[in-house]
Amino acid sequence: MGKARRVVPSSPVAQHKHCPICGEVMQPDEEYCSAKCEEVAAKRRKDEQRLRIIWYVLLIVMMLILLLPLLLQYKGF
Ligand SMILES: [Zn+2]
């Protein structure tokens, strides 16, 4: 039942890649079109890492706030 969808293995259009930073067409075996874009990507990754650390710290603080009354109760305070 239904029509089988034909999958095209590879088209010549897919032979090139776009730079994830500026969108410029570039070589498929390279990650970024230039050293500048690579720098931007590295900076962005660092920012993401910092954001993740902030999130973890917030999560731990929230857990502590939630658990503190329980801990105090456990100690018979
Ligand atoms: Zn680029």
Image (cartoon, helix red, strand yellow):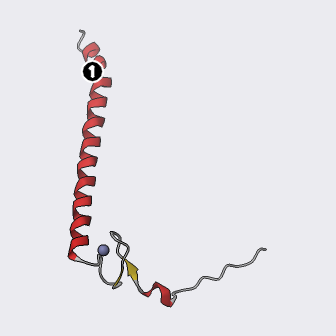
**Horizontal and vertical percent position of residue 56:** 27, 41
Q: Give the quarter of the figure containing the N terminus.
A: bottom right
Residue 74 located left or right of residue 18: left
- Farthest residue to the bottom: give it: 12
Residue designated by label 1: 68
Residue 70 located left or right of residue 10: left
**Horizontal and vertical percent position of residue 44:** 26, 59
In depth, the one of 55 and 32 nearer the eye is 32
- Farthest residue to the right: give it: 1
Question: Residue visible at 39% across and 80% down?
Answer: 17
Question: Residue visible at 24% across and 65% down?
Answer: 40
In depth, the one of 6 and 11 nearer the eye is 11
Q: Identity of the amino acid at label 1? A: Leu
Question: Residue visible at 60% across and 82% down?
Answer: 7
Question: Residue visible at 58% across and 85% down?
Answer: 8
Instruction: Place residue 33 in its image quadrant.
Output: bottom left
User: On screen, 51 above or below 26?
Assistant: above
**Horizontal and vertical percent position of residue 76:** 25, 9
Q: Give the quarter of the figure containing the C terminus.
A: top left
- On the rendering, which quadrant does ligand 1 occupy? bottom left
In depth, the one of 73 and 11 nearer the eye is 11
Residue at disc 1, secondary structure: helix
- Farthest residue to the top: give it: 77
**Horizontal and vertical percent position of residue 34:** 24, 77
